[in-house]
Amino acid sequence: MMDDVLAPEEHDSIEGVPPPSVTEELIGHRAAWAELQAAYESGRLHHAWLLQGPRGVGKATAAFAFARLVLSNGDPVKGAVIRRQIAQESHPNVLYLSRPASDRGGGFKSFITVDEVRRLNRFFQATSGEAWRIAILDPADDMNRSAANALLKILEEPPRRSLILITNHTPGRLLPTIRSRCRTLRFGPLEPTDLGAILKALPLQLAGAEVERAVALAQGSARRAVSFAASGAFEVEERLRGLLGVREPDWGGIQQMVDALTLKGRETAYDLTIELALAKIADAARMALGEGEAYRASRLADFWQSEAERFAAAAAFNLDRKQNLLTFFLGYFALAGELN
């Protein structure tokens, strides 16, 4: 459930969708939540938790929910007050670290800086006493090397009554020394029923068929499901499926789609198109492997890897989006011609 609590804009905010700090209820992940509750009730709570799993499945929502549980000691009335304070960044014993606002103009920086992580030192020094001091870092994947080293130093000598909750999408992007100092909690893809419940709890006014469609495309990610539903990207998905599902490329149709996706204000649809395109390549590789076509599966997997890296680099360096998409289609049909 949601209410009218306002929270500051974040780097990955979806317009009209409340952020994790405001979300009242964690839907799904019952085993992970039970483990958190058991650890808290045992009185032997580890100082650092690594909430690890695919992007958009609810790790940050779980982190905020657990912070409220610890600070309210399970009192729902107190928890509601704490939720408002955390969402408005006014709770003295909670610090949320994510990608900071850009120094110039609008938008956000592309990574979590060392200065952001060093705020933890000031936070833990400024708050004392018997109350828990809780920091949420979301996600660890966005830290640069200096920020990661600064976090490691804090984890090596944790302050008393401190709790650090760290989300992580890709285990390989995290220093092994950071992982070794945290208790890891795994989050898997959400079940379709849980995804449906999340969508129905949001103020998106979706029809039943739209909810089912978003769930089918989401691959277990609430963020993907919500992004599709909120951005009206179903038309984009249909168009992409039609353009990729033919032997001879429709370059006129491809150009038209690329032009539409690279207009100002279509950033969300553009990002989702990339996700869908990569997902279709991954699905094709899995299907080929299941049918015993090892070479085809290998070539598709290699193409997925190279395109995923290329898209990531293009986003990091703000390269031309139109050329970025056209390069994908050129590579896709070149590979399709080789394999057919």
Image: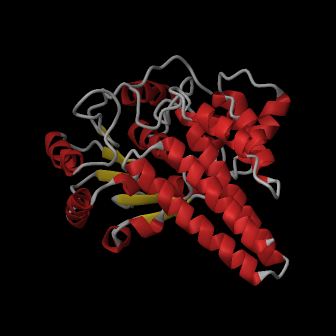
Q: Position of residue 269 (x, y in %)?
A: 60, 36
Q: Answer with the quarter of the image where residue 72 lies.
A: top left
Tell me which residue sits at (54%, 34%) in the image.
Answer: 262
Q: Residue furthest top?
A: 4
In what quadrant of the picture does the N terminus appear? top right
Observer able to see residue 218:
yes
Asked where in the image residue 308 lies, by quadrant, the reply is bottom right
The spot of residue 257 in percent (x, y) is 67, 37
Can I make out residue 25 in this image?
no
Residue drawn where x is 30% and y is 40% of the image = 95
Residue 133: percent from left, percent from top:
28, 44
The quarter of the image holding the C terminus is bottom right
Q: Give the quadrant of residue 179.
A: bottom left
Residue pictured at 56% horizontal, 23% vertical? 16
Total numbered badges shown on the rendered structure: 0
Q: Nearer the viewer, residue 304 or 18?
A: 304
- Of 198 and 47, the residue lying toward us: 198
Figure colour scheme: secondary structure
> Is residue 212 toward the left or the right of residue 228 in the image?
right
- x and y, in percent, of residue 325 in the image: 57, 48
Q: Is 282 rendered above or below residue 117?
A: below
Q: Is residue 250 found left or right of 112 in the rendered image? A: right
**Position above or below: 323 against 296:** above
Residue closer to the observer: 151 or 123? 151
